[in-house]
Amino acid sequence: MNPLSVVVRTICDVFAWFMGIFGVYIIIHGHLTPGGGFQGGAVVATMIAFLLVSHGGKKLLAFARPGFYSALETTGLLLFICAGFFGITTTLFYNFLAGQGGLFGSAVPIGPNSGIINSAGTISLMNMAVGLEVIGGLSLIIIYMFKGIRLFENAEGSGETGHDR
Amino acid sequence: MKKRALFMLAILVVAGTFWGALDRIHLFGDPVRAPMDDYYLNNAQQERSVNNVVTAIVFDYRGFDTLGEAAVLFTAVCSVLALFRKGREGQ
Amino acid sequence: MTGNAPFLVVGIIFFLGLYAILFERNLIKIAIGISLLEASANLLLIVLGYRSGGSIPVFTLAGEVKTMVLPTPQALTLTAIVIGLATSALLLSLIMLLYRHYGTLDVREIRRLRG
């Protein structure tokens, strides 16, 4: 995949920031609005595909290290399991932080309300953990499938055939 | 040709089953009894202090399901990585 | 009968996917058929949990509406979507490797070239 023209690259550089911020917004507001860890992680991972299309494979593979995303994925899964196991004194996946006060534990009013950002206990923690895992996993899938395409082109013996200069 | 006729017969059987199910299912927009969902809707805010009931179910009431789901995602990523490994080209 | 039109739509999507899996010969089209089956299953879950006049089960955005749609099928659909995503990624990777090995995507050709 060759890089696209300079206009496309500049616009994509600007809008990739918005995509990343929107994905993080979806992740950290997962307990207030529709969305959550999986959806926000998918949005952030779309940013990688976006940059891959605009900047081409060589530059993206120099920028996005697979080891970093692998660490992100493993950390997310471990954090999720830990957040589930911390409530083991009652049951597995018990929400031991809800309603206790503190950073995650504000109680919400009953009925339709406008929402409090630091409520929901371990649910918001798990949203962030799953968000990290999905960001890492989907980015790894995108990067490795692109590497598979490049491997395939080398095996065919066809050179780099781009559609732009 | 015989195989295609057999496939058509299978599709007809599945379609008949589907038609029977459509005849007996509840009307759209009116689930008759849903006590579990009513419990979640009434008590999720009080018990888990969360506004989004779907998130409360996914991450709290049915957290074990979500653990399995995360494991499935992890396994799929590992399988894709194993399929496209670099050393595969040599053999 | 017209009240149950969404169930009928589920059935139509299901049979389109089944037709693609059974009668198409291109592997990519078979993968599209599997994705259609997943989409029909998700749509069935969502349609089963709908209450007429209900709002979304999120209290931040619900407004003053009393009835809400059932939240459990939506949670299960969330699970199903992520699993479908993972399986389709694995499926497309396998199709890529299959094309690299055989040089074709036609299932009859692949069956003939086997071995």
Image (tube, coloured by chain):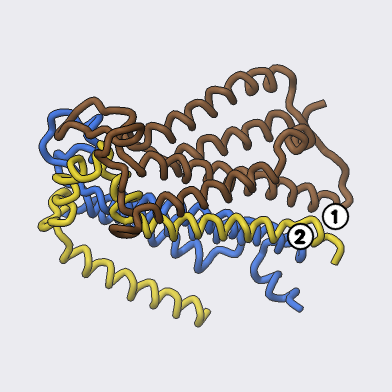
Chain colours: A brown, B yellow, C blue
Figure quadrant of the N terminus of chain C: bottom left
Indicate the position of residue A75 as horizontal and vertical percent values. Answer: 56, 47
Labels 1 and 2 in the same subunit: no
> What residue do we see at 71% from left, 61% from top?
C97
Instruction: Assess disc 2: are there few (<14), some (14-19) or many (≥20) residues with their C-alpha within 10 Å of its C-alpha.
Output: some
Residues at circles 1 and 2 in contact by the CB criterion of under 8 Å: yes
What element does badge 1 sit on? helix
Task: Residue under label 2, please give it.
Answer: C100
Amino acid marked by disc 1: Ala
Label 1 marks a residue whose chain is: A
> What residue do we see at 77% from left, 32% from top?
A59
Label 2 marks a residue whose chain is: C
C23 lies left or right of A126? right
Indicate the position of residue C89 as horizontal and vertical percent values. Answer: 58, 54
> What residue do we see at 17% from left, 41% from top?
B46
User: In the rendered view, would you say A105 is above or below A10?
Assistant: below
Amino acid marked by disc 2: Arg
Question: Can residue C2 be seen by looking at this rendering?
Answer: no
Task: Residue under label 1, please give it.
Answer: A155
Res B65 → quadrant: bottom left
Res A12 → quadrant: top right
Indicate the position of residue B77 as horizontal and vertical percent values. Answer: 60, 55
